[in-house]
Every structure is written in structure tokens, then in C-alpha cells.
Amino acid sequence: MTRANEHHLKAGERIDKSCARRRKQISEAIRRAGGLNSHPVAYRAEEDLLWSTMVSKLNAIHPRVASSRYLQAKDRLPLPVTHTARIDDVGQRLNNSAGFRLLPVDGLIPIENFYGRFADDIFSTALYLRCPSRPHYSPEPDMLHELVGHVVMLSDPLFADLYRLFGEATNNATSNQELQAISQVFWFTMETGLVQEDGRTKAYGAALLSSSGELAKLDRCPVEKFSIPEMIESDYDISAYQGKLFMAQSVDEMASEVRSFLNGT
């Protein structure tokens, strides 16, 4: 390792420690005053700048790579560009349009809680932002991921109903094996799903649509034909760019296959 690289690594470590301290502050604020459609956090200027920079970049990319359903959902539930979004505002607008409410949480939660709450029209969302050292991809869900990816799509009635079905299937699961299968299918559809539109590959998954880095590499990622059995058997890593994606021929095909799986789980 050269001294220049060593200096860069140490700088990155300092940034990460700063991020950790900020996340702790946000977590404490949520525990003190969190609740449905509440926003107990005041964002800093640097957080507003990070949000504005990344949302502007994603807004420029989406027309080329996002599915038409997602682009319509963005028009239905626009997010601010000049400042970090507020959960009380976005949550109320989402509640009015689709019935879902937003619940701030202070970190990763068990999948049975995250998915299970969908059945009660609740989406759990982080309120911290990704570290400035990795703005183009977040290895864990941050508020950019939650709102730009999931919450915008929740304003689409078809997708809102699919999320509810994931919640009901989770709550009805009787084994860890069933929960794992549900989680696998959610990852390869709602998080990283692709669809064919007008002969082109378009993204509808939240993890893709909230990551400018992921979208830039989309045409270099191996793409498989939509197959729920294959999804259940496939490995994935949330901390890195994807090694495999699945593409449906249409949103209707995807929704039909997912409904059949969840109703039979």
C-alpha cells in the first residue's frame, strides 16, 4: 500500500466514524419521539447537499432506465430536490394516495417485522443518509433508498397491493424456510427487479432505482429470465453491486407470478 492510499483509507475511516456518530444521534431522536408519519430529525446542511446531489443525479438517470410505472409513480409522489425529504410530509401524501404510512426505525429490523407490517399498510424507513464517502451506493438501507426506491413505488396501487401480499404471506409463514423464500423473492423483485419495455431493459426494484452506481452498471450485470424457483435458490449480497438480476416480460407477468407464489406460501 502506498502512503497516498494509506492516507485515503484513513480519511475514509474518519468519515465512516462520523457517519456512525450521526446515525446514533438520529436513532436516539427516533426512540425519543418517533411514530407513524413523524419526523423527529433536523437535517444538517451537508445532509441536504448530499440528498440534493444524489436525487438530482437519479432524476437525470431515471427517464432512461426506470420502468414506466416508476416514472408515473414519481409524478404521483414527487420528492423534494433542494432539501432532504421529511417523513411527515411524504408519509401524509402517501397515506392520502395509497393508504400506506411511514414508520421511522433506528436501524435494520427483523424481516418478519419489516415485511409483516406491510399487511397493516406500514412501511418502516430509516432516517439516516448514506455516508458521503459512498454516495452512489448504500450497502444498507438509508433514507434515499427507502424514499426514492420503495416509497415512490408504493404510490402505485399495483405495487402497494403486492407489498401488502408480502406482508400477509410473512405473517402467515410457519417456518424460517418460508420466511427465507419470501425474502429471496422480495429481493429479486421489489428490490432488484427488471422488466422488458419496448425492447429495452428497465428497472422497477428499489435498490436499483436508488443507486446511481448500480444503474450505471446495469447493462453489465447478468440477467436471467424471470423465475421464482431460481430466485429462491440464488445467492445475493446486499453490500455490493449485484451479480445476478431477473427480468420479467411485463409488470403484469411479474405481478401475476408473485401473487401466485405469495398466495400459495
Image (cartoon, grey):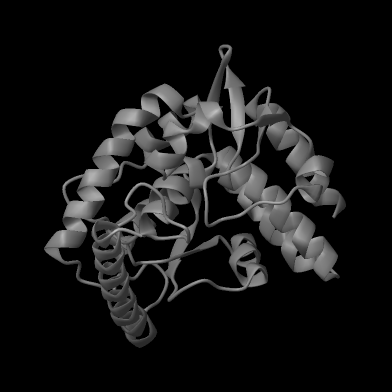
In the rendered structure, the answer to whether residue 64 lies left or right of residue 117 reads left
In the rendered structure, the answer to whether residue 54 lies left or right of residue 167 reads left
User: Residue at the location (62% across, 71% down)?
Assistant: 113
Viewer-closest of 161 and 64: 64
Looking at the picture, does residue 220 appear above or below residue 46?
above
Do we see residue 84 in this rendering? yes
Do we see residue 80 in this rendering? no
Q: Position of residue 218 (x, y in %)?
A: 51, 31
Q: Position of residue 16 (x, y in %)?
A: 32, 70
Q: Point out the residue furthest to the bottom here.
A: 32
In the rendered structure, the answer to whether residue 156 lies left or right of residue 253 reads left
Q: Position of residue 14 (x, y in %)?
A: 26, 72
Looking at the picture, does residue 147 appear above or below residue 87?
above
User: Residue at the location (25% across, 52% down)?
Assistant: 51
Quarter in which the C terminus is drawn: bottom right
Quarter in which the N terminus is drawn: bottom left
Viewer-closest of 204 and 131: 131
Rendered image quadrant of residue 92: bottom left
Looking at the picture, does residue 156 appear above or below residue 47?
above
